[in-house]
Amino acid sequence: MAQAFSPHCPQCGADINTAQKFCAKCGEPLISTTNGPQAQGAATGQPSMQGIIPASSPQTLDQYPSVPAQSAPSHIEDVPTQAFNWQREAPSTMQPSPTPAQSLQERVPDQTMVSQQQVNQPPVAPVPVSSPINPNLPAQLPAAATSRRINRKKLGFILVGIVVVVALLAVAGFSLLPILGVGKVSQSPITNTAINTTVDYAGVDVTILKAQQSQSFINDPVAQKDGTVRLLLQVHNTGSQSIVFNYNQLASIILPDGKALTPIYTKGNTQLAAGASQTGTLDYAVPQTTPVSQLVFRLGTAATAQMSVPLTGHANVSQYNTKTVTVNQQPTCSGENTCAYGLDWEVTKVSSSLHMGNQQANSGMRFVTVNLSVSNTLTEEVISGSPFTYMNVKAGSLSLNPVESTLPVAFPSGANGTTGTVTFQIPQNVTTWTLTLSPQSSDGFDPATFTIHA
């Protein structure tokens, strides 16, 4: 005999029967399936809760006794056995009890229904996939971010283009303004002082043509606000060698307080070939309140014999000129033997200069060149050798050897008035000095001396 079964409301636990659609106590809607699992349970005498399922119950099908496979409708045999969640139906929207097939189809929609729902769903923005290089950065950005990036690039190109155009307009404007006379700098008044003074430095005749004084010169890239003095020079290389005439090292201006100024700007080629001439300008930062007549132009480095030219326009620079003294003096012998190789010696003249060719004398020194005439009255040739071995000059406490000579090393028999020169570098402040010819002691000749005043 079949045992009576009295199910309970899963919501409140009240007794219910299979014909109820709602719980009498709590009003929970109930779904009844009387033709499927319910009938099977009645036939077998086993209770079955598969026919009564609350529409909003959070429980899954796994919590209820499963429906035997032979009692399930044929069109739902492939229903997955995984858990399902069911939506609660509001009491006010009650629907007629679905058939078991309809109930299961609502609970487990087939693949066609799922695909149709996916098609009908609104588009969802793609989720960026993490970059394999840096997991914190997305490998692909959404379309909106990509669009913003493109717009930023376009904005960058536009800004660069604007900057280039503005720069070109600025350059064109600055180039046209001087032509149009806008912003053109005018030359401040210039005071000219004629100098026309020449000195010979290292074989180069340096002529100071004139001095100009102004607050500044518009063609001087190193403009001065306090004042500038410009010297206009003409140079001529009288030597036989090409030289480099470096104005920045050689040319300076001495202020009244003794301060030396080097040029702030020079114009002119410093390479000067033998016999060549050229002009140039030297600019000095001299206060405009200092008169040009109180300035001194100085040539030469600290290691060489310097020349100072006052910029008065009538400076006396004769002390720097080459001086020649006629001597015509025979030597004095200091022994009983034949004097100085038995030759007749005579100093004809002596020249003094601050340079020898393109070489300037050392600081505080000068070059003296002794001109000699030699005759041989002997019957045989006399070989005296180089003057560097038997000539020297006694100047004060200094014993000085020759620096240059053109005198022959041998004099044939009967030679009369053979000439040559021997040059020494002696102190500028020594005006009396002694030239000595000292043959080797083994030669059997006594020394010969000349006392020179030059």
Image: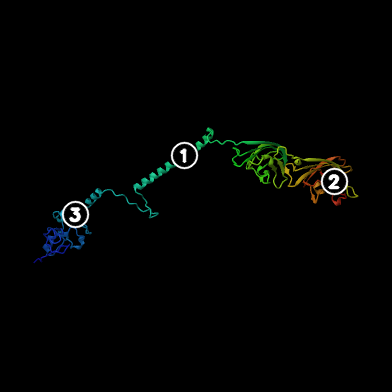
Few, some or many residues within 10 Å of mark 3 (<14, 14–19, 20+): few
Residue ranking furthest to the front = 289
Mark toward the start of the polypeptide (2 vs 1): 1
Helix, strand or loop at mark 3: helix
Check disc 3 and report the residue beneath it. 106
Mark toward the start of the polypeptide (2 vs 3): 3
Disc 2 vs disc 3: Cβ atoms closer than 8 Å? Answer: no
* Residue 188 position in % (x across, y down): 60, 36
On screen, residue 323 versus residue 144, left or right, reads right
Residue lying at 61% horizontally and 36% vertically, measured from the top left: 189
On screen, residue 71 versus residue 430, left or right, reads left
Toward which corner of the image does residue 313 lie, by quadrant? Answer: top right
Check disc 2 and report the residue beneath it. 450
For the residues labelled 3 and 1, the Cα–Cα distance comes to 71 Å
Q: Amino acid at mark 1?
A: Val
Helix, strand or loop at mark 2: strand
For the residues labelled 2 and 1, the Cα–Cα distance comes to 84 Å
* Placement of 235 over or under 449, stated as above or below: above
Check disc 1 and report the residue beneath it. 166
Q: Which mark is residue 60?
A: none
Q: Amino acid at mark 3?
A: Glu
Disc 2 vs disc 1: Cβ atoms closer than 8 Å? Answer: no
* Residue 178 position in % (x across, y down): 54, 35
